[in-house]
Amino acid sequence: MLWRMSAERVIGAALGMFVALFALVRANRSAAFDLAVTLKLQERDAPALGALMRAASWPGFPPQSRLIPPAVMAAWWLAGRRRAAAFQLAAWGGALISTAIKAAIRRPRPLPPEVRVVVAPLGGTSFPSGHVLTYVGFYGFLGFLLAEQLRDGPLRNVSVASLTGLLALVGPSRIQQGHHWTTDVVASYLLGTAYLFALVELYRVTTPRGLLQRVLDR
């Protein structure tokens, strides 16, 4: 019950802040802030930092972005965790949410010479960041499942810590590489968090124990 109340508060707060940010971006009132943050992040041209940012973004580009999620779902399925595989598929739905919102707002991506764009400018639109939204939903839920399924120990700790680090780095990487504005990234973290908490809550209440608890609470 306490988890459910906390989850509902997090979901409500995250969605409320996302809507506010969406309105701000749609009114074109964040441009100066976005440009200032990007230029600040791109001031440091350290090779190690660039390599770290590229590594954080790498799983979100095709073909790996289309291979890793099915591989994870297949691993859950083959391990006999059919319910986990199904929920992991639902967690991949952040990519569809991102596509729908991009079509509605059609915000241009950052472009040279205003900012430095790593490798080459990407196609499509900028708001929200598909990388971040997909990562928070898919890899965030994967971290939750691993924390639930693995026993306490080095494997569990390293797995969850690695996924947490990936989620923390992907947002800055999208800005530093010049592919997204800061508000694109923040919006995706907010919407992704709401989506992740909703999935975790649904997963919890649909376990046999969760269903029994719902009956007893009536």
Image (tube, helix red, strand yellow):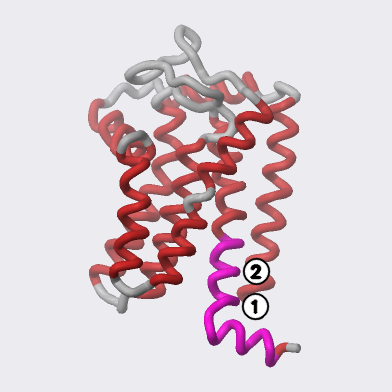
Give the position of the N terminus as an image quadrant: bottom right
Q: Is residue 210 magenta?
A: yes
Rendered position, 21 above or below 152 = above
Name the residue that disc number 2 marks: 6
User: In the image, is 48 to the left or to the right of 38?
Assistant: left
Rendered position, 143 above or below 178 = below
User: In the image, is 46 to the left or to the right of 69?
Assistant: left
Residue 2, numbered label: 1
Magenta span of residues = 197-216
Q: Are marks 2 and 1 in contact (CB under 8 Å)?
A: yes
- For this orientation, the residue located farthest to the top is 113
Rendered position, 136 above or below 75 = above
Q: Tag 1's secondary structure? A: helix
Residue drawn at (61%, 24%) of the image = 33
Q: Is residue 77 magenta?
A: no
Q: Tag 2's secondary structure? A: helix
Q: Position of residue 26 (x, y in %)?
A: 72, 26
Residue drawn at (46%, 64%) of the image = 86
Residue drawn at (36%, 59%) of the image = 73
Residue drawn at (45%, 25%) of the image = 179
- Identify the amino acid type marked 1: Leu
Q: Position of residue 45 (x, y in %)?
A: 31, 22
Of residue 211 and residue 82, the one placed in the foreground of this image is 82
- For this orientation, the residue located farthest to the bottom is 216
Residue 104 occupies quadrant: top right
